[in-house]
Image (spheres, coloured by chain):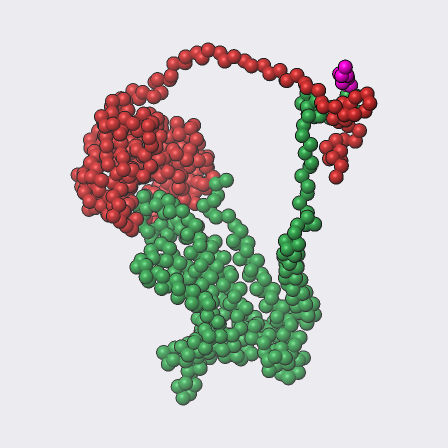
Chain colours: A red, B green
């Protein structure tokens, strides 16, 4: 195949053929000067003060009464213990962040609080989990889960309308009564508290799965708080969201903690620092450290906490 | 003295803008790269060429066979089909002109299909829900699954013989004709539809199971975490999601039921007309015998005792259209997007 067929338009100039001596013999192409490239010397960096107020939570302390207590809790999957002898108080008006590397039992601990670990066949537990002084084993799981609500990692709405997603949470099992008109104030109130009502007010009958990811997660929160629970469990609620939606949800968590106790599992240390009042650091199933957010992040006692918070591992 | 080569400047480029090699000599110093050769069959090794050709031949010949069947049946069927035939009852006769229409076979097919699918859909769907959502004890779940597989793999003539043995028991006498001496005939719409439902159950079962397995675990957990029981979760969250899977499975099962012959030949009594037994309305028809399009085609064709090949072609065409229609419906239901994927 003739290369001029595909490389050059007909009659185009090929420099390789143009460099020749007078007798017609070809020559090496002349060495050409290298291209001039302007190199801009970097400016001396100007020190920008970090936005400190964003990272040091200075907020009113509104700690309320103790809602839940985890008492020497051990959870096993088969023979492997996922949570080992953990004891923790959970107070109303506080955000408790569970931090730690992957697979350290944070989510298992969280799911034990509303007895969702029981749905895993091999799971067994020792020790106590108390809700208002009552062992959760003695509360009917359906009643318990209306008092200890949960928000998951992925927005997991049901294929229903926005209204029905929240109404489903309020209704007892799948009873058709109360009717829509009676439920409407409660649904709207839940959407308001989740900061979503203004965005969806014009179309409560639209399918919930058409909302954006951040709106879906806030609708999940609205669904969870619709039954006025005492404790709200959140399992990495922002890990599937963009930074803007994350900021909205974090602000929402700050609002919600006035009325209820929030337990949040997060891999994002900065997020734990931003939203939490109390931090519990877990490592391989052990509760290594529990304390105020400033203390855990700035003056950790255990060296594993110090290494993890400093980013040495995890 | 060596001569220093004289640099001859390149002549102006026609058009002027085509030289985009990036600066002086950029294009001249670029390595020569041939354009990628187009991947053509002529450059393949012969084995690959032969395999490629075989693929084409296989695909085209299947298309040809399908077109041939459809075309032949359409030409033969439409030729003899008339509206009058669809609404006339069949008559036993040796003369083809006296054999009447295919009203009873059409009604028989409809009755059998509706009855069988009404039995099969709840059984198949509920079995799938139990297997996926409960499935304990595990040995029972495994036994049920392999039981359904066995039923799915059983030849329908075996099901038919088995059904006859069952429905001739005195226990099932109310479901068919009982002779004066107390002998149970064992052949009726009840018996045939019960055994035909066994053909559709595996299809409903596997379609529902696939649908349930596609629902992510966290959707169920979301419902449980709201304090809902498993039953409530199945009813309110899972059933709406798998509804279209159940519909697909049922429609495919209906296609199988409509096309089945062996069970109908054995278990529907083989009477050309729908022959009621007893005097209770509706129930008498279901207790009685009859025929379907498949048995009509078999009986009317030269293979059977009748000799009405033109009627057979017409009935076969109606049957073919019915089955193709059901398959098209199943495909269109299956193509609908899942309610869980509504966000996009």
Over which residues does the magenta segment extend?
A: B1-9
Using the rendered image of the protein, determine whether residue A259 is visible from the camera's viewpoint: no
Against A70, is B189 above or below? below
Q: Is residue A133 left or right of residue A158?
A: left
Q: Is residue B6 magenta?
A: yes
Where, by quadrant of the figure, is residue A10 drawn? Answer: top right
Q: Quadrant of the N terminus of chain B?
A: top right
Against A129, is A293 above or below? above
Magenta stretch: dominant secondary structure:
loop
Which residue corresponds to the image point at 42% horizontal and 87% vertical from the top-left?
Answer: B180
Q: How many marks?
A: 0
Which residue corresponds to the image point at 44% horizontal and 54% vertical from the top-left?
Answer: B210
Question: Residue A146: where, in percent of width, then height?
Answer: 28, 42
Question: Residue A17: where, in percent of width, then height?
Answer: 77, 26
Q: Is residue A201 left or right of residue B136?
A: right
Extreme front residue here? B1
Against B290, is A226 above or below? above
Extreme right residue here? A23
Q: Is residue A242 magenta?
A: no
Which residue corresponds to the image point at 49% horizontal and 78% vertical from the top-left?
Answer: B266
């Amino acid at each position: 195949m003739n290369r001029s067929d595909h490389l050059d338009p007909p009659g185009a100039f090929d420099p390789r053929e143009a460099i020749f001596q007078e007798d017609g013999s070809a020559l090496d192409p002349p060495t050409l000067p290298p291209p001039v490239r302007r190199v801009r010397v970097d400016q001396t960096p100007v020190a920008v003060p970090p936005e400190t107020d964003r990272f040091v939570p200075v907020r009113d302390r509104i700690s309320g009464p103790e809602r839940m207590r985890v008492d020497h809790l051990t959870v096993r999957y088969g023979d492997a213990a996922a949570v080992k002898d953990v004891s923790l108080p959970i107070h109303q008006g506080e955000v408790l962040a569970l931090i730690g590397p992957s697979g350290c039992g944070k989510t298992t601990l969280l799911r034990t609080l509303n007895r969702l670990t029981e749905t895993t066949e091999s799971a067994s537990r020792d020790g106590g989990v108390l809700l208002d002084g009552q062992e959760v084993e003695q509360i009917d799981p359906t009643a318990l889960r209306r008092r200890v609500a949960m928000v998951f990692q992925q927005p997991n709405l049901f294929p229903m309308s926005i209204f029905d997603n929240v109404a489903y949470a309020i209704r007892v099992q799948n009873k058709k009564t109360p009717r829509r008109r009676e439920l409407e104030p409660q649904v709207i109130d839940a959407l308001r508290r989740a900061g979503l009502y203004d965005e969806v007010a014009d179309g409560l009958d639209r399918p919930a799965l058409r909302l954006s990811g951040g709106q879906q997660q806030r609708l999940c929160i609205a669904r969870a708080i619709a039954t006025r629970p005492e404790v709200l469990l959140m399992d990495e609620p922002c890990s599937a969201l963009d930074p803007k939606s994350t900021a909205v949800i974090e602000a929402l968590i700050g609002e919600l903690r006035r009325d209820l106790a929030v337990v949040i599992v997060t891999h994002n240390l900065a997020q734990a620092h931003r939203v939490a009042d109390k931090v519990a650091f877990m490592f391989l199933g052990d509760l290594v450290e529990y304390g105020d957010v400033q203390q855990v992040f700035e003056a950790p006692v255990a060296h594993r906490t110090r290494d993890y918070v400093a980013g040495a591992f995890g | 003295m060596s001569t220093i080569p004289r640099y001859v400047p390149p002549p102006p480029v026609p058009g002027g803008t085509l030289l985009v090699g990036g600066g002086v000599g950029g294009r001249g110093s670029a390595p020569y790269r041939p354009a990628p050769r187009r991947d053509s069959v002529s450059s393949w090794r012969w084995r690959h060429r032969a395999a490629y050709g075989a693929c084409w031949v296989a695909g085209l010949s299947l298309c040809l066979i399908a077109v041939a069947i459809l075309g032949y049946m359409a030409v033969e069927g439409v030729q003899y089909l008339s509206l009058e035939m669809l609404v006339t009852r069949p008559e036993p006769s040796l003369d083809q002109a006296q054999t009447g229409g295919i009203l009873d076979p059409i009604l028989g097919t409809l009755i059998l299909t509706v009855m069988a699918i009404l039995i099969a859909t709840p059984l198949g769907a509920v079995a799938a829900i139990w297997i996926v959502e409960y499935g304990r004890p595990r040995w029972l779940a495994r036994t049920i699954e392999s039981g359904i597989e066995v039923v799915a793999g059983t030849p329908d003539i075996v099901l038919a013989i088995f059904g006859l043995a069952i429905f001739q028991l005195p226990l099932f006498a109310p479901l068919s004709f009982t002779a004066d001496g107390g002998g149970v005939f064992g052949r009726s719409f009840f018996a045939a539809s019960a055994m035909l439902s066994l053909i559709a159950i595996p299809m409903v079962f596997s379609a529902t199971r696939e649908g349930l397995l596609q629902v992510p675990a966290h959707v169920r957990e979301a419902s449980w975490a709201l304090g809902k029981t498993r039953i409530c979760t199945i009813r309110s969250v899972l059933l709406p999601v798998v509804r279209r899977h159940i519909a697909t499975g049922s429609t495919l099962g209906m296609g199988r039921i409509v096309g089945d012959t062996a069970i109908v030949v054995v278990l529907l009594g083989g009477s050309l007309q729908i022959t009621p037994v007893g005097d209770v309305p509706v129930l008498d028809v279901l207790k009685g015998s009859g025929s379907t399009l498949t048995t009509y085609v078999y009986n009317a064709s030269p293979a059977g005792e009748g000799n009405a090949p033109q009627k057979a072609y017409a009935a076969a065409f109606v049957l073919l259209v019915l089955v193709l229609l059901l398959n098209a419906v199943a495909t269109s239901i299956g193509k609908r997007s899942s309610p869980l994927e509504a966000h996009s």
